[in-house]
Image: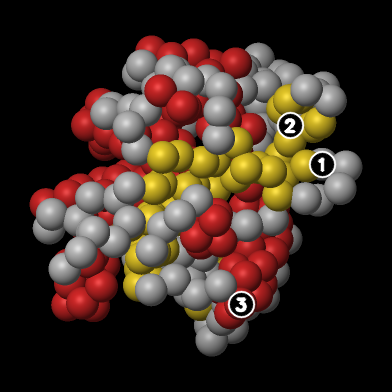
């Protein structure tokens, strides 16, 4: 009998997406090699690195990422539909050699994006892989949308946060899905008074520095829903509101899509404490990705062997 084609659906989740590296590492060590990889947002980026054979390079960069290195990818501007134009990110992918045509790779790959005008999900399956990734990670309010032909494209997590359906359409018999959006609701970001967390000056504009100063940094504490708000609690910052709104949206969309199109095995790394923009916490996210695969190995074995 022919071996079942394995599909890996890598979900959206911004900084939590580093967990996908740990997931792929653990699956590879267990001898589980996907034939189809589909990703939304950060899932598209990590999936592309794996397909291109550059996952080790991405892991090395991520685990050594500091706020200064992350800031180096933020080419800020006030026009174009986002705070960051994304040119530096495209250059970053090229430098990692994640740039060949999608159709040239041995593993079948698709990145999910969302059409701005209609809200339709778009499956990117051809052309330079870094361009597909750039469209899939165009998070509203952060990264500017991408013009592909006559269509403006946004983050794939807006329409299909965990692209199980794409894996199935591309011929996968057994689908392993990674949902990064579990356990996210019911949190509240609070700002501790001491100590002040140092951060690099990204731009000369004081106004932009103040906006970026609301990024959820490691010094911020996350309060649970059961904890009462203290008197005089300051209102949430720009990125707190944006992060919570995106979490709510993606959680609802994910639940709806997966109810109608469940995978064979669902992996849910425990990433509750990692904020939307905490890209400097890759080591923690990668470890959680690895751990969730190790816990799910009995279920995985039933389907893939």
The secondary element bearing badge 2 is classed as: loop
| Residue underneath mark 3 | 260
The tag earlier along the polypeptide, 1 or 3, is 1
* Residue sitting at x 56%, y 72%: 261
| Residue underneath mark 1 | 116
Report whether 202 appears left or right of 78.
left
Task: Tell me: residue 210, above or below residue 180.
Answer: above
Tell me the number on the disc at residue 266: none
Check disc 1: other Cα within 10 Å, few if <14, some if 14-19, many if 20+: some
Report whether 223 appears left or right of 22.
right
- Residue 209: x and y, percent? 65, 29
The secondary element bearing badge 1 is classed as: loop
- Marks 1/2: CA distance? 8 Å
Comparing labels 1 and 3, the label whose residue is closer to the camera: 3
The tag earlier along the polypeptide, 1 or 2, is 1
Q: Which of the 4 quarters of the picture holds residue 229? A: bottom right
Task: Tell me: residue 36, above or below residue 151.
Answer: below
- Asked whether the residues under the numbered discs 1 and 2 touch, taking CB atoms below 8 Å apart as contact, a structural biologist would say yes
Check disc 3: other Cα within 10 Å, few if <14, some if 14-19, many if 20+: few
- Marks 3/2: CA distance? 29 Å
* Residue sitting at x 62%, y 42%: 123
* Residue sitting at x 67%, y 22%: 85
Task: Tell me: residue 87, above or below residue 277.
Answer: above
Tell me the number on the disc at residue 145: 2
Residue in the foreground of this view, choosing between 128 and 98: 128
* Residue sitting at x 79%, y 32%: 152
Position of the C terminus by quadrant: bottom left
- Residue 188: x and y, percent? 58, 69
Position of the N terminus by quadrant: bottom left
């Amino acid at each position: 009998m022919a071996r079942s084609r394995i599909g890996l659906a890598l979900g959206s989740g911004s900084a939590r997406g580093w967990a996908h590296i740990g997931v792929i590492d653990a699956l590879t060590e267990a001898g589980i090699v996907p034939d189809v990889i589909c990703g939304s947002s950060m899932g598209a980026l990590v999936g592309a690195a794996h397909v291109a054979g550059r996952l080790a390079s991405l892991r090395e960069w991520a685990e050594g990422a500091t706020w200064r290195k992350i800031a180096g990818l933020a080419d800020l501007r006030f026009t174009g539909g986002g705070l960051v134009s994304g040119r530096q990110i495209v250059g970053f992918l090229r430098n990692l050699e994640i740039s060949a045509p999608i159709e040239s790779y041995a593993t079948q790959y698709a990145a999910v994006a969302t059409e701005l005008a209609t809200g339709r999900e778009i499956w990117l399956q051809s052309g330079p892989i870094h361009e597909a990734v750039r469209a899939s990670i165009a998070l509203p309010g952060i990264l500017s949308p991408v013009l592909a032909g006559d269509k403006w494209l946004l983050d794939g997590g807006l329409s299909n946060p965990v692209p199980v359906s794409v894996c199935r359409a591309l011929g996968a018999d057994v689908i392993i899905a990674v949902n990064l959006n579990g356990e996210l609701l019911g949190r509240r970001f609070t700002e501790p008074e001491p100590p002040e967390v140092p951060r690099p000056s990204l731009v000369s504009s004081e106004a932009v520095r103040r906006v970026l100063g609301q990024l959820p940094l490691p010094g911020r504490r996350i309060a649970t829903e059961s904890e009462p708000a203290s008197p005089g609690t300051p209102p949430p910052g720009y990125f707190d509101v944006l992060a919570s709104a995106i979490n709510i949206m993606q959680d609802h969309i994910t639940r709806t899509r997966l109810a109608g199109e469940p995978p064979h095995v669902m992996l849910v790394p425990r990433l509750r404490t990692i904020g939307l923009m905490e890209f400097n916490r890759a080591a923690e996210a990668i470890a959680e990705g690895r751990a969730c695969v190790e816990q799910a190995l009995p279920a995985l074995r039933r389907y893939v062997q």
